[in-house]
Amino acid sequence: MEDEKDPFYVVRKGDIVGVYKSLRDCQLQVGLSVCNPSVTVFKGYGLPKEAEEYLASHGLQSSMYAVGARDVKDDLFGKLVLCPFQEPESFSGNTSNEVSPPKRMRMETVGLITVSTTPKKHLNLDDHVGNQANSSNCCSCVLKFDGASKGNPGLAGAGAVLLAEDGSMVCRLREGVGIATNNVAEYRAVLLGLKHALKKGFTHIRVQGDSKLVCMQIQGLWKVNNPNLAGLCKEAKELKVKFQSFQISHVPREFNSEADAQANLGIHLKDGQIEEDITMGSSSTRR
C-alpha cells in the first residue's frame, strides 16, 4: 500500500498520450469519442521525476498533459497496469477517483478493457493499441505553419502544409496577409491550416511551427499582451477545440522549410487571397 500513493493515469488515444491526476479528469477530457480512435488507459503510482521533467521540458506544467505518442519512450512512466475506462455519464454522483468493475460501453464498437492483475514493469503503450493507429490515420494529420514579413511590419504572407499521418502530402497552402508583422503572419498561417484541416474532415491534428510565441500562447502558457494578436489567438483556441485531439509544438526553423516556402510565396498575394496546391497521388492541382 505504501507504493500505491499519488495515482496518475496515462491515456493512449490514437497518436496522443495524455497524463491525468484523476480518472475523472481523464474521462471528462477524453469525452464521448472513445472509439475514434479507441482509448487505452493505464494506471501508475507516483509519477517519476524523470517524467515530470520530460513533460515540463515540453511546456506542460499543469495537472494534465498531452504529448505525441511517438515522443514517449516505453519506460518513461515506470510501472503501469491497464485500467478500466468508462464514459463520464456512467459515474454521475460518484465523486471517487476509482471506478467500479468495467461495464460494456454504450458504443457498440467499443468492447471491454481487460485489467491486468499483475503490474508489468515498463508496459509498452503500444502493446494494447492493436490496429487503432491504422483506423485513426484517415482522420489524423500534421500541420506545419510559418509566416513571413518583409520589413516586420511589411508585406507579409502565411504558409501551411498539411500532411497525412503517414507523412504523405495532402496540400500546400499560402495566403496574402497584407502589411503586417511576422507574428501576425504566423498566426494567420495557423488559422489557415486549422480551417483547411477541419474542412477536409481531419479530427486529430499535430501542429508544428518555428514560432515559439505562437505555440506557447495557443497552449495558454504565455500571456498575449499585444492587442493585435489577442483576437488571432482567441480564434486559434476556438478552432483547436473542434478537434478530438490537438497538439502544438515548437520546432527549429531548419525543420520548417516547406511551410516557410509557402509563406514567402504568400507575400506576393493580395490580403486574404488563398492558393492551394492539392496533391493527388503523383500529380498536383492548384486552385
Image (spheres, grey):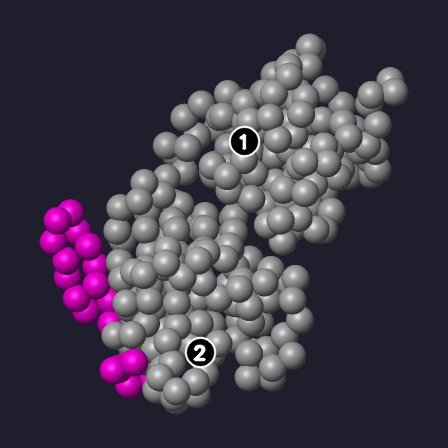
- Say few, some or many: other residues with alpha carbon within 10 Å of mark 2 (under 14 / 14 to 19 / 20 or more): many
Name the foreground residue: 91 vs 119: 119
Q: In which quadrant of the rendered view does residue 89 lie?
A: top right
Q: Is residue 27 visible?
A: no
- Say few, some or many: other residues with alpha carbon within 10 Å of mark 1 (under 14 / 14 to 19 / 20 or more): few
Question: Residue sitting at 47 percent across and 72 percent down?
Answer: 187
Question: Residue sitting at 17 percent across and 66 percent down?
Answer: 286
Q: Compute the Cα span from label 2 to label 1.
A: 35 Å
278 horizontally vs 92: left or right? left
> What secondary structure is marked by label 2?
helix
Mark sitting earlier along the chain (2/1): 1
Establish if 118 lies above or below 63.
Answer: above
42 horizontally vs 136: left or right? right
- Where residue 143 sits: x, y (%)? 39, 56
Disc assigned to residue 182: 2
Name the foreground residue: 191 vs 31: 191
**What's under tag 1, amino acid-wise?**
Lys
Q: In which quadrant of the rendered view does residue 284 lie?
A: bottom left
Question: Residue sitting at 21 percent across and 59 percent down?
Answer: 278
- Where residue 246 sits: x, y (%)? 52, 52
Q: Does the magenta-highlighted stretch encompass residue 285?
A: yes
- Where residue 32 sits: x, y (%)? 58, 41
Q: Which residue is mark 1?
A: 73
Name the foreground residue: 96 vs 193: 193
**What's under tag 2, amino acid-wise?**
Asn
The stretch in magenta equals: 267-287
Q: Is residue 142 visible?
A: yes
170 horizontally vs 33: left or right? left
Disc assigned to residue 183: none
- Where residue 6 sits: x, y (%)? 81, 32
Q: Does the magenta-highlighted stretch encompass residue 137?
A: no
> What secondary structure is marked by label 1?
loop
